[in-house]
Amino acid sequence: MAGNSETTDVEVLEKKNKLLLNQIQFLTDELHKTKEELEAEKKKHSEDNDAAASDIKHMVEESIELKKRLAVLQDDLNDMEDELISTVSNKSLRNENVLLRKDIRTLKKECEEATSQYEIVRDQYNSAIIETNELRQEVESKKSELLVKTNELKRAWRELEQNREDMALMMREYAEKSAEDAEPTNWKKMEDENGKLKGEVERLTRNNETLTTLMNELKMEIARINEQESMLPALSDSSGAVASTDTLESHGVVTALFSPEDISTALRLCINSLVVMMNVFTRSSNQELIRRVSVLNLLKKQVVLVNDEVQVVVHREDQHRQALMEQEMKVEDAEAAVKALREENEKLTAQLTSKNYDLHSTQQQLQERMQEMEVLQTAGKRREARAGEEQLEAIRASFNKRLQESADAKCELVREKEALRAQVSELQREVETKKAELAHREQEAARQEKLAATKDTMVEALRKQLKEQTAALQAVKEEMSKAQSSTTVEASELKQTLIEKEKKIQQLQDDLDDAEDSLDDEKEVTEKLRKENRELSEARDRLRGDVKELEHDNEELTEKLKNQTVLGEQLKKKSAECLTAAKEKEAAQAQLAAVQQELSLVQQELEGLKRLQSRVVVPTAKLEEVEGDRIHLTSRDEMLEYAQEMAMDPEASKDVVELQCANCQLENDDIAVLATVFEMGGFANLRVLDLSNNLISLRGCTTLFQALSERDTGLNAFHSWKGGKEEEDKCVNMLQVLRIGNNRIKTKGFVFLLNLIKEKKYPKLWELDVSVNELDDLCIKEMTKMLRTQANVSSLHTVSFEGNGFSEALVQEFNSVLLSSYN
């Protein structure tokens, strides 16, 4: 059995190593993917920067060309005015020309102020674009968080698969145990296999430690790369507009806008200022100012359009944020539902394991009862008929109870299966809702693409108008060159038409810029919607995979239910066999009447033996007391502090003879701390170790037994190698009393200790207390076998098996063998 347990441990370690290797490969793939994404993003940033720089250069060149044209036109106008003044000698006309020049200069100043305000508005619009870029970065960060959550879900799913593999290993162990119980065991082969498997286990543990260190290093690199991604500046979308040198900011006025409300207020102020200017111009008596009212009205309309477009963009961004929040909430709800389903699946697997354990225990009890029936049939001469009938009634009652428990377990499994089906139907409904949302998103994306197409047509129409206006400008210039000899009124009208045409050209150019900006925004929105649709489709595929896996789990549960029904049928067959055995017993009762006189004598002998069996601890000679320190620890914290002190200075524990750690609520990790002290050479003269009434299980007891048997061997080997001398192996294990009663030690842990005793690792062990644990008959059988064949490997005089539920025959046989061994 020990070899079988070690082979299963080796298989579990190999599977864990494979899982770790798969995780390392997955992490390396993710690292490669993240590096590729970083390089792609850097390329995109550089391309966007180059495009923005080229656009800015193009705009600057166009503005310089326009300024040169305006300067040439102004020079031409000044030359024409000088020629007109030289031709006309009237002083009144000269005065009127001077007044017109003053009015033109005032209008130029007002136009410059309007252009500065327009540049302020444009800067505000650029700040709004920067805010949208920040929102994009937030969306990308949320996407990365979603990826992290999906990775966590994948890890949880891998843990589920590992649990399923552990369940399969448990079932295999159960089958192997049943096969080994049916066949005779070869202990020599088992011992050889144990020796081989120990080396393999140590090698696999070392590989496991190296793999865990590699995993930690890869996780640190992934975290560092993620930090670098989060620290990358958004260079692509933060290109500001080129403003003129003479602006409000150059004069010390603060024009920074930090929110959509600030943008709307600034635009309203512009509109109000334009309305005030229009009112002032309409009230004035100058006809030139009255003619400028239409220009101001057009400018006001364009500012109102800009305000409306800004509000529409802000509204769309708010809607987009709300949609993202809703999607995140839905994804979180789906993740919570998946986690709940997994938890319920784990509960069901735990219940199945408990039911399998109960069935196994019932089968063992039935086998014990069958053995007792056989003993009753063979030893019918020594038993009475009444005792056999009472035992049969007890067997029937226990069998009926087990049948009822199996029926209740089946009902509970059916209920849980129905609940799982309901949850699967709910998940399917959620998947259908996700599909509907996807269809709606796709319709919105199509509508956005249509709007983008209409915007493109609008931009092309505006470009045609621009071309027409430039052709008209050229025609007007030709007319001006022909009409140089006309009157001053025509010259003034031509000036006004030129100014109006230039303003219209500027307005059309601004409209073109605004339309191009809106097109870019629409394209970005469509790209976002497409990305969201892809993410929703991926989530839908994941949910479908989860639903399929849940259906697969349901099929496994149904197969397990079928297996349990087969086991119930086997139990019914065994009950029929019990009835046949009862009939045979009734036939044997006729023979019992002739042997009743012999039974009385045998019963007297049995009563004497039972008095001896009431106490499993065999009284032996007393141990010789050794002088030294006796330490009594009463709590877990006190024990941990003491162990840490001894680990810092192991030589300080040389005088300790007895260590009492009973009733301290010690667990496996605490026992590992104590085992490190033993491995470092501490407690060299320890004779008594009391760890009873604690919470020690298989992992803790094996580390403790191994540390006690091999303590200080590594240090001795190092000192012998350093000194250049090869010394013989000296046993430093002076332990005489080991009390580990009332813990959670099972058969594997006791067999592990027994193998160490066989290897002469506990030569001076006098007393062993393993009472009130979870041991079975195999432990006492192996102990009796060891005392018969290898009595000289230890000094055992007292062994306590109380509270483990052993049969009286096994205890009696063990006591007799123990007495003969030390006598």
Image: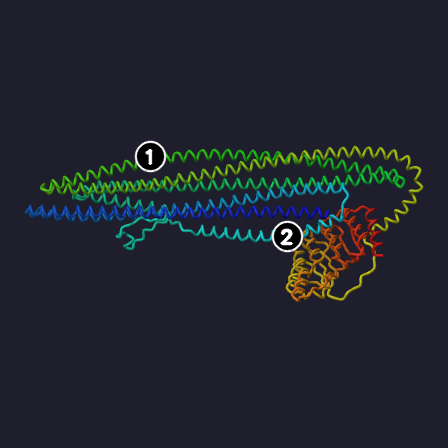
Pointer 1 residue: 454
Q: Earlier in the sequence, mark 2 or mark 1?
A: 2
Q: Position of residue 706 (x, y in %)?
A: 70, 56
Q: How far is the residue under mark 2 from the one under mark 1?
A: 71 Å
Residue type, label 2: Arg
> Is residue 690 in view?
yes
**What secondary structure is marked by label 1?**
helix
**What secondary structure is marked by label 2?**
helix
Pointer 2 residue: 203
Q: Residue furthest left?
A: 89
Category of crowding for the residue at label 1, using alpha-carbon neighbours closer than 10 angstroms: few (below 14), some (14–19), many (at least 20): few
Q: Horizontally, is 514 left or right of 775 in the view?
A: left
Q: Horizontally, is 135 left or right of 594 in the view?
A: left
Q: Is residue 24 above or below residue 392?
A: below
Query: Residue at coordinates 68% horizontally, 47% vertically from top-left?
Result: 7
Query: Residue at coordinates 69% horizontally, 64% vertically from top-left?
Result: 726
> Is residue 744 in view?
no
Q: Position of residue 384 (x, y in %)?
A: 88, 39
Q: Horizontally, is 277 left or right of 664 in the view?
A: left
Q: Nearer the viewer, residue 455 or 633?
A: 455
Query: Is disc 2 in contact with disc 1, using a CB cutoff of under 8 Å?
Result: no
Q: Position of residue 747 (x, y in %)?
A: 73, 48
Q: Nearer the viewer, residue 636 or 573?
A: 573
Give the quarter of the figure containing the C terminus.
Answer: bottom right
Q: Position of residue 743 (x, y in %)?
A: 72, 52
Category of crowding for the residue at label 2, using alpha-carbon neighbours closer than 10 angstroms: few (below 14), some (14–19), many (at least 20): few
Residue type, label 1: Thr
Q: Is residue 738 above or below residue 348?
A: below
Q: Nearer the viewer, residue 686 or 397?
A: 686
